[in-house]
């Protein structure tokens, strides 16, 4: 199956747009229409820009700060700006009128949106349109019967013991054969290593093995350039940037004309499609899906085995969830590790107690993972402060009133904000901005928070199906790395800067120096 990567690589980025020779005999009317359309689009874009800078859409302080980007003068990240607004609001809910967006950090509202009135708050067509080119009809981009069917199928597969054992086998292999040797090779060098890039490569290899049954080899010692991983990164980022447009007409027109970022997005998605479709084709040709344990093989043995487009969408959705969220969580966890010197010592002491100080196992067993209460708390604490998905939006089907009294008009975008919710004093106390894993432990036992106060894995009917697999992967990596290496940030920062995207990405990466731990 690995040969599919070589086969696709030979055609990588071969996106050929046929451009006919210039014909100077085109009818004048066609030229006039094209010129008029271009001029109209330019004037329309200029009008939107003028509306933005003149703040004609809304005169409230929140909208003015957002539309003029003046929030950047006081806050390092947009989510910090939202947190400030939400903390000032007595109801922990605000309305950005210019965006037709209600944003909340109120747990009662989150319960209402994700559980009590779940049918009234689907993903919605606006969201589906933004991510439709990348995710298609995948589980994260659909509602109704299609979502229900995929969720039942995914729940059945991901909850099986054979899938969990296969996931642990893949994970252990990637840690032993790739991650630890790479970090060891950097201990003798004075140069820095971008840990975020390492974790992205690690999680991409891991999820491709688990989902496709193929090995892209992104984390080999040479750190090869992966056109597929880069294409996936680019497609995710450009898809997310569509949501930042003042009007969806802007990106829709660019897509129609195939220009600018929309042209780059189309090329990146073409590369992603090549990978997914070629893997499906080769699996079907060889018949290996009838015996293999990877996720794609399991889906191909289901009722949708003949729908290649549907299979492609499902696989890409799981690739997005399993790769980006894990890499994001690992990056911010090691950012927290660099800023909290006692954290590594506590994790090391607990792993020595559970695994034994002289154990040569790199990856703990499932039973050992369950016994590491402090590690479990530390991972949850890191995600409280830096959730891999900082906010999530739904669209109201009908008029509604939230529990805090906020009126929601039909068609309004409603956003709950896990990043801000992790910084609310009434839930987490006056030390809510501090990294303190002990807040999760009571009488030596992990004490979980309500999923509506801590919706990092969503909650209600859309709660993350891969939660346990993701936590296992994250904790295994942390234990394996902390027991063998000391990680030091090259440029210590108290607050990370985030780049726009579907998941949390640290701007500029996480450059570190790696030293072998002396025991």
Image (cartoon, rainbow, N blue to C red):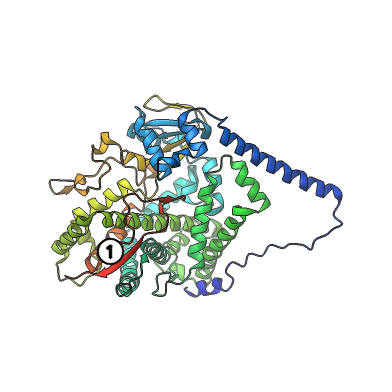
Q: Determine whether 421 is above or below 338 in the image.
A: above
Q: Determine whether 196 is above or below 414 in the image.
A: below
Q: Which one is in front, 89 or 300? A: 89
Q: Which one is in front, 203 or 70? A: 70
Q: Is residue 459 visible to the viewer in this orientation of the structure?
A: no
Q: Which one is in front, 481 or 291? A: 481
Residue 62, horizontal then vertical, whole percent: 45, 32
Residue 78, horizontal then vertical, whole percent: 43, 43
Element on which disc 1 rests: strand
Q: Which one is in front, 69 or 182? A: 69
Q: Determine whether 160 is above or below 1 in the image.
A: above
Residue 137, horizontal then vertical, whole percent: 52, 50
Residue 207, horizontal then vertical, whole percent: 40, 62
Q: Determine whether 250 is above or below 318 in the image.
A: above
Tell me the quarter of the image containing the C terminus. Answer: bottom left
Q: Name the residue located 45 percent from the left edge and 65 percent from the top edge.
A: 212
Q: How many marks on residues?
A: 1
Res 119 → quadrant: top left
104 lies left or right of 17? left
At label 1, counting other C-alpha atoms closer than 10 Å, the crowd grade (few under 14, some 14-19, many 20 or more) is: many
Q: Is residue 415 visible to the viewer in this orientation of the structure?
A: yes
Mark 1 — residue? 487
């Amino acid at each position: 199956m690995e040969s599919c990567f070589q086969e696709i690589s030979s055609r990588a980025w071969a996106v050929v747009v046929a451009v006919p020779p210039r014909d100077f005999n085109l009818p004048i009317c066609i030229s006039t229409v094209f010129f008029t359309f271009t001029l109209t689009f330019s004037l329309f874009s200029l009008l939107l820009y003028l509306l933005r800078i003149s703040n004609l859409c809304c005169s409230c302080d929140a909208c003015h700060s957002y539309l003029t980007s003046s929030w950047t003068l006081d806050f390092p990240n947009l989510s910090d700006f939202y947190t400030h607004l939400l903390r000032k609001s007595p109801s922990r809910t605000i309305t950005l009128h210019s965006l037709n967006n209600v944003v909340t950090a109120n747990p009662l509202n989150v319960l209402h949106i994700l559980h009590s009135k779940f049918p009234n708050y689907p993903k919605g067509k606006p969201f589906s349109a933004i991510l439709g080119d990348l995710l298609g009809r995948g589980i994260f981009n659909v509602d109704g019967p299609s979502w229900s069917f995929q969720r039942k199928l995914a729940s059945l597969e991901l909850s099986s013991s054979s899938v969990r054992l296969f996931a642990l086998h893949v994970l252990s292999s990637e840690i032993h054969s790739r991650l630890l040797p790479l970090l060891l090779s950097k201990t003798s060098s004075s140069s820095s290593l971008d840990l975020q890039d390492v974790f992205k490569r690690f999680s991409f290899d891991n999820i491709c093995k688990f989902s496709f049954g193929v090995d892209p080899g992104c984390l080999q010692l040479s750190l090869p350039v992966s056109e597929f991983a880069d294409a996936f990164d680019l497609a995710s980022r450009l898809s997310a940037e569509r949501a930042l447009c003042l009007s969806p007409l802007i990106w829709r027109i660019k897509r129609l004309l195939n220009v600018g970022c929309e042209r780059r997005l189309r090329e990146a998605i073409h590369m992603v499609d090549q990978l997914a479709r070629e893997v499906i084709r080769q699996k079907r040709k060889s018949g290996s899906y009838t015996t293999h344990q990877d996720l794609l093989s399991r889906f191909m043995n289901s009722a949708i085995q003949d729908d290649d487009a549907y299979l492609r969408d499902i696989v890409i959705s799981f690739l997005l969830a399993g790769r980006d969220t894990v890499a994001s969580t690992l990056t911010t966890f090691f950012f927290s590790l660099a800023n909290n010197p006692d954290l590594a010592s506590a994790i090391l002491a607990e792993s020595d107690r559970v695994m034994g100080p002289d154990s040569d196992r790199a990856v703990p067993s499932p039973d050992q993972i369950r016994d590491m209460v402090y590690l479990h708390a530390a991972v949850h604490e890191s995600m409280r402060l830096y959730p891999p998905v900082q906010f999530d939006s739904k669209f109201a089907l009908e008029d509604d009133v939230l529990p805090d009294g906020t009126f929601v008009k039909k068609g309004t975008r409603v956003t709950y904000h896990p990043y801000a919710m992790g910084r609310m004093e009434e839930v987490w106390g006056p030390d809510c901005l501090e990294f303190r894993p002990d807040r999760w432990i009571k009488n030596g036992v992990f004490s979980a928070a309500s999923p509506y106060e801590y919706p990092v894995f969503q909650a209600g009917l859309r709660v993350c199906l891969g939660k346990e697999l993701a936590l296992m992967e994250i904790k295994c990596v942390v234990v394996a790395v902390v027991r063998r290496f000391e990680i030091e940030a090259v440029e210590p920062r108290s607050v990370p800067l985030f780049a726009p995207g579907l998941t949390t990405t640290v701007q500029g990466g996480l450059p570190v120096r790696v030293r072998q731990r002396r025991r």
